[in-house]
Image: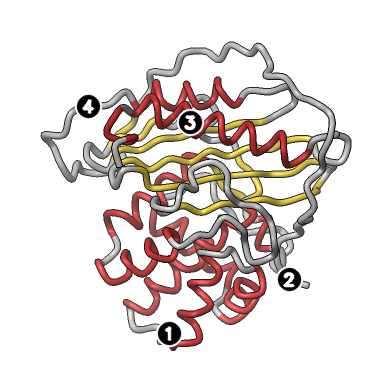
Amino acid sequence: MAGTLVTVDSLNGGSSTLAALALPPDDTTETVAPPTAPDAPEVDLAGAATAGEEAAARDDFRVAVSVADTATGELAPGSNGEDTFNTASLAKLFLVVDMLERQRAGEIQLGARDLRLVHAALSSSSDPAMNALWTEYDGPAAITRVARSVGLEDTTSPEDPSQWGEVQTSARDMVKLLRHVQVDLPAPDRDLLLRSLSDAPRIAGDGFDQGYGFLDGRSPVKQGWLCCLGSRGDMHSVAVVDGRFVVAVMTNEPMVESPRGYDAARESVNAAAGAVRQALGPTVDAR
């Protein structure tokens, strides 16, 4: 079946301790867009990305955290922001952006069925919905079109065009994409997409517990998880936080040989998300 190769069962038992890894300080930011609120108080984005990476660090885990500020147009890629991961269900966001932009250009017309599938793919992370849209709306080429139009440098279509979960992208590209959604899309398209992301339930359509990372019942968020390619898995959380910040936490970790599997991955992503929220300041917690 086309789609992400996902195992739903958590791999429980055992214990895991945080690795005592000291990441090098990263004070690098880059301007990715004009500011939307030039007078907004500056926030230490690089510090937030580093805090997230340090909080999530574990033995044999790959972790990347990137943060963008739509108010200032600045982006902090973090120490590993250019590293690529399997998107898992984050690929759904790329495809929907392409569909909406093609409709806006008059190339396609989305009907009621299409919009129901879009909502299911983005909220409950329905794989059957994504399978249908990926096939009907030229998924592999959609990834290339979005990467080109948004200026994504680390995003490529999967080697096997049927396996949309194996689209490659980075934390840096994910925050660029979500910033594009938040700021650049026309209001009807932006609102349709962000409402669907905000509707994400704790339990996904396939029964998987996606209540980790930035999923809080009010923030637009897309979760991703995939197991087990090369005995490893991926778990991601990307979100618009406080209506201003765009954050991506992406991880790759041992699964088959690990006694705790997804449970350890959830702890790592939760730690990163909590550290980022704290570092971004009180406005994030006040909502």
From mark 2 to mark 4, how far is it between C-alphas?
Answer: 44 Å
The amino acid type, in three-letter code, at marker 1 is Leu
Query: Element under label 3?
Result: helix
- Image marks 2 and 4: residues in contact by CB distance under 8 Å: no
Please determine whether, in this image, residue 63 is positioned above or below residue 212.
above
Horizontal side of 275 relative to 169 (left or right) equals left
The amino acid type of the residue labelled 2 equals Ala
Looking at the picture, tell me which residue is in the foreground, 240 or 25: 240
Whichever of labels 2 and 4 marks the residue nearer the N terminus, that label is 2
The residue at which mark 4 appears reads as 42
Residue placed at 80% from the left, 35% from the top? 260
- Reading the image, the residue beneath label 3 is 274
Give the Cα separation between the discs numbered 1 and 4.
40 Å
Q: Which mark is residue 2?
A: 2
Sooner in the amino-acid sequence: mark 1 or mark 4? 4
Q: Quadrant of the C terminus?
A: top left
According to the image, label 1 marks what residue? 110
The alpha-carbon separation of the residues under discs 3 and 4 comes to: 20 Å
Q: Nearer the viewer, mark 2 or mark 4?
A: 4
The one of 104 and 36 positioned closer to us in this rendering: 36
> Which residue: 53% across, 35% down?
82
Element marked by disc 1: loop
Nearer to us in this view, 44 or 230: 44
Sequence-first disc among 2 and 3: 2
The amino acid type of the residue labelled 4 equals: Glu
Callout 1–callout 2 Cβ contact below 8 Å: no
Distance, label 2 to label 3, CA atoms, is: 34 Å
Image height check: is 263 above or below 51? below
Secondary structure state at the residue bearing disc 4: loop
What residue is at 65 percent from the left and 63 percent from the top?
164
Horizontal and vertical percent position of residue 97:
43, 65
State the scheme by which the image is colored: secondary structure
